Image (cartoon, helix red, strand yellow):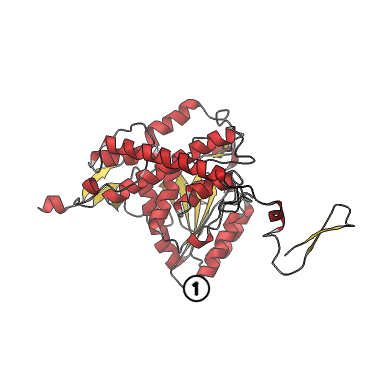
Amino acid sequence: MAAAAAARRLSAASLPLRHHHLLLRPFASSASGQPPIAVETSVPFTGHKIEPPSRLVDTTPSELLSFFRDMSMMRRMEIAADSLYKSKLIRGFCHLYDGQEAVAIGLEAAITKKDAIITAYRDHCIFLARGGSLVESYAELMGRRSGCSKGKGGSMHFYKKDSGFFGGHGIVGAQVPLGCGLAFAQKYTKEGTVSFALYGDGAANQGQLFEALNISALWDLPVILVCENNHYGMGTAEWRAAKSPAYYKRGDYVPGLKVDGMDVLAVKQACKFAKEYALQNGPIILEMDTYRYHGHSMSDPGSTYRTRDEITGVRQERDPIERIRKLILSNEVATASELKDIEKEVRKEVDDAIAQAKESPMPDPSELFTNVYAKGLGAEVFGADRKEVKAVLP
């Protein structure tokens, strides 16, 4: 009896990996009547000026299935976006997130929609994790009116304010001061919420990041700086750009934590810990050790500055979806057949969303003049010669 009631312990690193993509839906037959599961993170947390949290993370069968489905959905969404870009249905800049899904999902599992997230331009999956839809995502990627930013933002500027997602941002590192500003507002409201400001290792050397961190620490703002270290800033390896690539230590006087960003349960544990810390003490830095499978953007093949063996090695040893797959199978939460059904379900959902997004019309040309100035100011728009008024903004 006691043994049956106890939480199961298993190491996420001790189970062999397999191949596949994945998806989420609780199965009544497998998710009910099971005890909670305690999973040991793949590697220990490493702390800077702080005692790291426990490696044992509590989860449930339904949560594991939701992680599987959600990360599979993200993976499939990005792979399909790659095809749409090559078909020229997506134009301009496009930065894909496949490989890094555990960061988005683990973060979301640790917080609420009242907490704020702001990130850089690799933002599609963060938007999806915050509650955005596939149709809104693809419509925005293709510049259509029903996109989350009305087709005017494109890949780099997803946005969902009602769920606390304050956008993707194209200027490297510029979202960090904005995230600290969100935390400044939260300190006033006293609602027990925090802000997560995400940035990459390439942005970690930006001066504005340190300026924002300094004032945040001075004012004890509830902000968590999350460095998604995928080890390459565009095509530049971290060791070529940073004298100290231990980004979790970069805050000096601000505590930091290094996390296996390919382990969704480790990310969940770290973000929960960081939120509790920030509410009491102010800023903390999380470095997520992660990896992107695609190149920096669609113009980057991603194979000129790293070997294919390196990419394959990460897929085989650290893939975040495969880690969850093996946990589900080893705990008999679902069968391999059920997981394949989930994958098929995800593919269909993505294909249906693409078809629906293609039906959405392009924005009206007049949309060029909206969302630029406050309404009612009567601002005038002139032609290039400054002689003829082209329009009066509403």
Q: Residue at x 27, y 51 (%)?
A: 60
Q: Is residue 161 above or below residue 262?
A: below
Instruction: Tell me if 271 is positioned left or right of 54 in this view.
Output: right
Q: Nearer the viewer, residue 31 or 199?
A: 31
Q: Nearer the viewer, residue 23 or 225?
A: 23
Q: Where, quadrant-wise, is the C terminus in this rendering?
A: bottom right
Q: Position of residue 378 (x, y in %)?
A: 77, 67
Q: Is residue 73 above or below residue 281?
A: above
Q: Nearer the viewer, residue 196 or 252?
A: 196
Q: Residue at x 45, y 51 (%)?
A: 129
**Badge 1: residue crowd in 10 Å (few <14, some 14–19, many ≥20):** few
Badge 1 marks a residue whose secondary structure is: helix
Q: Nearer the viewer, residue 75 or 269?
A: 75
Q: Quadrant of residue 358?
A: top right
Q: Residue at x 55, y 60 (%)?
A: 179
Q: Position of residue 47 (x, y in %)?
A: 41, 52
Q: Quadrant of residue 304?
A: top right
Residue ID for mark 1: 189
Instruction: Specify whether residue 292 is in view.
Output: no
Instruction: Tell me if 236 is positioned left or right of 100 in this view.
Output: right
Q: Quadrant of residue 109?
A: bottom left
Instruction: Specify whether residue 140 is in view.
Output: yes
Q: Position of residue 101 (x, y in %)?
A: 44, 44
Q: Position of residue 208 (x, y in %)?
A: 63, 56
- What type is the residue that disc 1 sits on? Thr
Q: How many marks?
A: 1
